[in-house]
Amino acid sequence: MEDTSQWRLQTSSGIPYRLVNRSGSFSYEGAEASEVYIIAASDLLSFVTTAFPEPYAMLGTLYYPQQPVMPGLGTLVPTNMTWKPHVDGLPCDPFGADTGAPSGTYQDYIEVTIDYGLTPSNDQQPEPNDPFTFLEVSANASGVFLSSPLDGANKGRAWELPDWVVEGDHITGGESSVIHESNIPFTVTETQVEWTIRWPSIPFSFWSNYLMARLREKLGTVNSSPMGILHNAPMDTILFLSYSASTSFTWRAGRTGQNPIQLQMNFLEKNFQTEEDYNSAGTLLDGSPAPDDISTHTVDVTHQHMWRPTYGWRKLQLNGKDLYRQTDLNKIWEPT
């Protein structure tokens, strides 16, 4: 085989290669592919680091270098790589482990298979100012059922009678009957959405020097501004519940005790509207005046609201302060 300097094809980093085969498959929104290359054995590590570039931090901002893409299809990037000797029966030594071997002991070329798949950044480089390009988000909607007392003191609440009632020998039209019983079972529905945000491949230095302090500061707080990554969830509706981190061991040298981190953050959204009635006297159930032109008003319920029996959803303050402290939760992943 001629010298690699004579080969026509080369990677974006200048590594010469020969293309042996290319195949793949598509589904409705999914795709995968593979390519088989021949490269010089001595180029293997450079080839791998080109396919899987390492994230790096600079001035408090985390950058993800653009991965190479499958030639001709920019939405597929390398996800896995395997290598083997180009010629069966003759070993290879791509890492120079046997420096004293006689000439011809090892072949000079290897066969590399690259598997391609999808990536959150699609066909562009992950952008530090756009968390959609490097964070992975999932949601799980649920609800909480609150038990609340309901009795005659709760004005505006009444039994609904049938369309007819029997009074002695006469049948008359139905009407509402005010509640007089005590401790009537009553359930209030509080809808919630559990959000999980996964942040993969965080360099240990960024995790230790910047990110850990941000998580400690913001844990247990609610958002002070809309959260774009959660589809512009309004202020006070997102509570930072918890996080978990795990170590991803790496083949890269020089990472002893400083392997990359996989981070998962859990948030709870309390964000719904409810209508409250004004009674016939023209006042709200808690006695506040009602506008002349409407019989109900809308309450935007957030984490700062609690259900108050008889009165409905109300903001609760302790010593003049809201239930939850506000912080800008976007700053967890935004550049400093």
Image: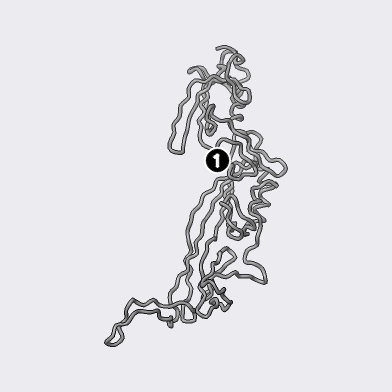
| Farthest residue, direction top | 2
Going 59% across and 26% down the picture, which residue do you hit? Answer: 47
Q: Residues within 10 Å of mark 1 (few under 14, many from 20)?
A: some
Q: Which residue is mark 1?
A: 120
Judge whether residue 234 can be spotted in this image.
Answer: yes
Going 63% across and 70% down the picture, which residue do you hit? Answer: 317
| Farthest residue, direction bottom | 168
Judge whether residue 79 can be spotted in this image.
Answer: no
Examine the rendered structure and indicate whether residue 23 appears above or below residue 275. above
Q: Position of residue 177 (x, y in %)?
A: 40, 81
| Farthest residue, direction right | 59
**Nearer to us in this view, 61 or 121:** 121
Disc 1 secondary structure class: loop
Q: Amino acid at mark 1?
A: Pro
Q: What quarter of the picture does the N terminus occupy?
A: top right
**Nearer to us in this view, 64 or 83:** 64
